[in-house]
Every structure is written in C-alpha cells, then in structure tokens.
Image (cartoon, grey):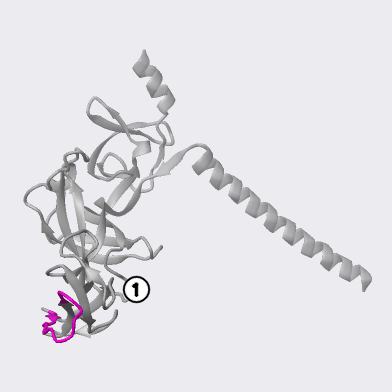
C-alpha cells in the first residue's frame, strides 16, 4: 500500500512539473516572437478618425438674476434645488429696507431648476461689478457642451457627427452625443492672450444623467471619419520613402503597401499585405544613419 501511494505521489508531481514547463515554454515563445523581436500583426478591425477637444457642460437655458439697481435684497422666494415654472417669483429688490415701500418680484421666464443662490435677504447689492450674481435658474432637461475647435481641425467637423464624451469627475465612464452647431466665424482673440484661432462648436448629449452638473469639464472625441472591417497596422511598422509606403515581413520580404484612413496610432492598409501577416518594426536607428550619410 505504501509503495502504491508513493507511485501516485510521484505521478502527481510529474504532472504538475509538466504543466509548469509547458506554461513557461509557451510564455517564452510568445514573448520571444512578438515582443523581443518587435513583430506586429496585420489585423482586421474598424478604424475611427477622431478629434479630441476640451469643453464645458451647459444647460439648455440659463437665467442669471442680477440687481437692476443699487439696493438691497428684500426677499428670496426659492432655495437651491427648487423646480420653478414660468412666472414663479424668485427675488425682490428694494432701494431701501424701509417698510411701506412697494416692490415687485423678479419672476422666472421658463421652467427650470434653481442651481445657485449666492446672496442672502437684507444684503446690499450693486448693479455693476463681477460679484453681483444673486441666483441662477437653469433648464436641465437637455445638456450640451461648448468647446473651442482649433483652426486646423475645423474643416473636418460636420453637424451630425457622433461624439464620445468623457466627464473629468466620472473617471472610466463615457456618454454619447453629436455635433449640433459649428460657428461660421472664429472667436475673437484676446489682445494679450493666445494667438490660436479657434471656432466654437456645440455638442448635444443624447441622454441625461443626474450626476452631471453644468460647468463640469469634459473631453470630447468627435468621430470625423470611419472605416469598417479593414486591414490595420500601427505606424511604427510602416516605412515611408519618397512618398511611397513599405513594410518588411517577418521573413524579410519588403512589400509596398497602399494606405487609406489614418489615425494618430494606426493606418488602414488597402493593398500589399494580407490579414495575419507578421511585420517587423521599423529600424529607426538604421534609417537615421542612412539619412545622415
């Protein structure tokens, strides 16, 4: 019995060692051919050309209530989060706090939500000045993003193009939208500001999320072109010479290829190679030596 148990134990150890050796060998082979020798593979996939622009969330409508004259806030009728309707009283201003004075409230001009109240009743407020906002009402039924597109990209943008939206405060999540407006003239430049020429675009969000608030920072990826089910290869495997493009296969055959749609990372291969072909990375050190000679 002891002898039989020993044989079973040895057999079990042998199987474990075999599996470990097999796993290690496969790991070495995979990393040795694909990583160590810098080999890429021609893949078939969808390719999207996109423009990334920073923007800010805005409501469908916004009403900023500011004092119409120098005076006092007599009464505030709402609080943050209140839903108001057209004609609802919001705030009453008074030239003085003496009793007997008749004043009429400022009313909402659309249905919305009170999102900010920055003053208190009895506070003195000035008609002019940067800090004279009393309260804000916003129509949050539809959110959109205002962004400034650089001049170099404006001709690629079209109304109706789809967009993927990432909000800075919601890491790992994305939202869907589309370009709804593109300015027909460039924004005025600051006299002492940036010399860049930019055009304002508007991107509407297709869904509403309660976690989103106006003023949040966003990054928009506008998809300007798309190629579906095409052969794709990363740029580091494609060599350019005198306006033509070449690749070097794993078996050292140099092939001329025709490129289609290109992104910052990858290019569509329209002809010259087949799906699954293994391609060597460009030897940039050799190329730089040839150029210097």
**Within 10 angstroms of label 1, few (less than 14), some, or many (20 or more) residues?**
few
Find residue 215 and report its image quarter. bottom left
What predominant SS class does the magenta segment belong to?
loop
| Left or right of 12, for residue 5 | right
Q: Which residue occupies the foreground of this view, 216 or 5?
A: 216
Q: What stretch of residues is rendered in magenta? A: 94-108
Q: Which residue occupies the foreground of this view, 160 or 242?
A: 160
The residue depicted at 26 percent of the width and 83 percent of the height is: 82
The furthest residue to the right: 2
Please say if 292 is above or below 74.
Answer: above
Q: Which residue occupies the foreground of this view, 80 or 22?
A: 80
Q: Secondary structure at mark 1?
A: loop
Check if residue 104 falls in the magenta segment: yes
Quick check: can you spot residue 238?
A: yes
| Left or right of 27, for residue 143 | left
Report x, y in % for residue 234. Answer: 35, 43
Find residue 147 and report its image quarter. bottom left
The residue depicted at 37 percent of the width and 66 percent of the height is: 173
The furthest residue to the left: 184
Q: Quadrant of the C terminus?
A: top left
The residue depicted at 29 percent of the width and 79 percent of the height is: 80
Residue linked to disc 1: 211
Report x, y in % for residue 86. Answer: 12, 83
Q: Quadrant of the N terminus?
A: bottom right
Check if residue 244 falls in the magenta segment: no
Q: Count every numbered label the image shows and give the total.
A: 1
Report x, y in % for residue 27. Answer: 59, 49
Quick check: can you spot residue 139?
A: no
Report x, y in % for residue 253. Answer: 38, 31
């Amino acid at each position: 019995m002891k002898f039989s148990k020993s044989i079973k134990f040895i057999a079990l150890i042998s199987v474990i060692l075999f599996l470990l050796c097999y796993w290690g060998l496969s790991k070495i082979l995979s990393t040795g051919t694909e990583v160590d020798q810098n080999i890429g593979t021609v893949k078939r996939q969808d390719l999207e050309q996109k423009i990334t622009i920073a923007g800010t969330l805005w409501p469908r409508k916004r009403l900023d209530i500011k004092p119409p004259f120098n005076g006092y806030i007599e009464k505030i009728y709402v609080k943050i989060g209140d839903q108001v309707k057209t004609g609802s009283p919001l705030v009453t201003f008074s030239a003085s706090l003496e009793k007997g004075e008749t004043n009429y409230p400022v009313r909402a001009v659309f249905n919305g939500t009170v999102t900010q109240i920055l003053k208190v009743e009895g506070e003195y407020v000035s008609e002019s000045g940067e800090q004279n906002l009393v309260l804000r009402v916003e129509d949050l039924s539809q959110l959109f993003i205002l962004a400034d597109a650089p001049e170099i990209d404006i001709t690629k943008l079209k109304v109706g193009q789809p967009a993927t939206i990432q909000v800075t405060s919601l890491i790992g999540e994305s939202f869907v939208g589309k370009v709804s407006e593109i300015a027909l003239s460039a924004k005025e430049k600051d006299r002492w500001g940036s010399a860049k020429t930019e055009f304002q675009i508007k991107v509407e969000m297709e869904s509403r999320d309660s976690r989103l608030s106006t003023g949040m920072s966003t990054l928009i990826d506008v998809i300007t072109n798309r190629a579906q089910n095409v052969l794709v290869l990363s740029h580091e495997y494609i060599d350019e010479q005198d306006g033509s493009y070449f690749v070097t296969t794993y078996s050292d055959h140099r092939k001329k290829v025709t490129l289609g749609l290109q992104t910052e990372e990858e290019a569509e291969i329209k002809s010259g190679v087949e799906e699954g072909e293994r391609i060597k990375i460009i030897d940039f050190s050799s190329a730089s030596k040839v150029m210097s000679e």
